[in-house]
Amino acid sequence: MKKENKMRKIKLALIISTTASLLFLSGCADKVQRIDMNNDKGDQVIGLDYRDFNQAAGEATQSLLKSSALNTKDGNRVILVISDIRNDTMQHIDTDQLIKKIRIELLNSGKVFVTTALGSSTDSMNKEARKLKDNADFNQKTVQKEGTLMAPDMSLSGKILQRNINMGNAKQQVEYYFMLSLTDIKTGLALWEGETVIGKRGSGKSVAW
Amino acid sequence: MKIVILIFSILFLLSGCVNKSYVKFVDNNIENYIEIKKINERVREDGFKEIEVVGENTTKYYKLFRYRVTWEDKDGFAIPSLSSNWREFPVQKNAQFRINVIAPNKKAVVYQLYLDKTDR
């Protein structure tokens, strides 16, 4: 009888200690917080984050719209192709983080149509759908005819550069350059050029990639 | 009676023409640092509205502020654009500053420009 009581006490002590440990550990777990993207007061990071892309895209589109580069004599939209946008940084970023924002803003401006028939934002279906010609499975009246794709008038190209500078005292400066050019394909002349520079300073131990 | 109806009709029509655009300080403390001197507006040749706010830093301190602009069409519907994100701008001591923004498209005719402090 005494032995049974002792066993019960040990079991109860085990349950209490396990529950207490679990409660303690759950309090230590890092809480995940969702970022308020409209008013983010979080610390800056040494790498590029969405705030930097927002700034670069915002400045580029404002500069483009203020210039008369996208104005046509007849008021028609310019057909724009996205050319090479190089990532010359040490970070694994997709340049669409910048270009997509610019494309959306320009499309909504009513001044531009972006072609996905060629360039770096090609939609392969433009070609694939045309291979359906003479395919008996498809109603041939619904297959796109030859000569319907629109050729671009202008091209948007550019690159994102990164420069790391060792400042001593275990500090570093990282400079990011967002460079864009708008070229008139007919003449090969660059009608607009834009550059946004973002500089950051931080610990030399921070890794900018 | 006809005159009263006429006056009310004119007032009603005029109320529809009121420009709801404005420039606003989010934090009233900003008034201690900067003063808005002029707000320029124009419709460019391409039909896009352009605004320019001219102000002055009345203190002897360099300051960093931020602004954002929201746009509406003539019916009061919001037009999303990148300019609605906060953007920082420097205000040099005892100097003028200019904020120049172009509308995201021709339909954007009403704007609200907000000025705020930064945490830096």
Image (spheres, grey):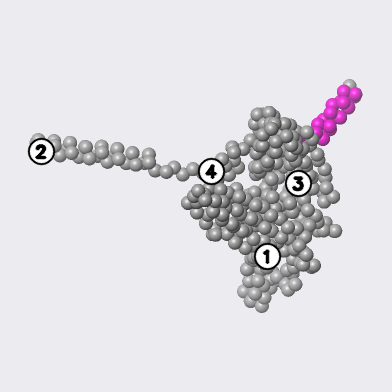
Judge left or right: residue B29 versus residue A12: right
Does residue A158 appear anywhere in the picture? Answer: yes
Residue A14, above or below A90: above
Pointer 2 and pointer 4 on the same chain: yes
Give the structural element (helix, strand or loop) at label 2. helix
- Front-lying residue, A26 or A202: A202
Residue at disc 1, secondary structure: strand
Circle 3 is placed at which residue position? Answer: B102
Question: Residues at marks 3 and 4, common chain?
Answer: no
Q: Please, what is the three-letter code of the amino acid marked with disc 4? A: Asp
Q: Earlier in the sequence, mark 2 or mark 4?
A: 2
Q: Residue A192: x percent and y percent?
A: 75, 58
Q: How many marks?
A: 4
Give me the chain letter of mark 1. A
Mark 4 = which residue?
Answer: A43
Q: Quadrant of the C terminus of chain B?
A: top right
| Chain letter of disc 3 in the image | B
Residue at coordinates 52% horizontally, 56% vertically from top-left? A209
Return the chain for callout 2: A
Magenta stretch holds residue B15: yes
Disc 4: which chain?
A: A
Q: Which residue carries the number 1 mark? A: A83
Q: CA distance from mark 4 to mark 1?
A: 34 Å
Q: Is residue A144 magenta?
A: no
| Residue at 64% in and 60% down | A159
Mark 1 to mark 2 CA distance (whole Å): 82 Å
Pair 3/4: label in front: 4
Magenta range: B2-21
Residue topped by disc 2: A3
Mark 3 neighbour class, 10 Å CA radius: few under 14, some 14 to 19, many 20 or more: many
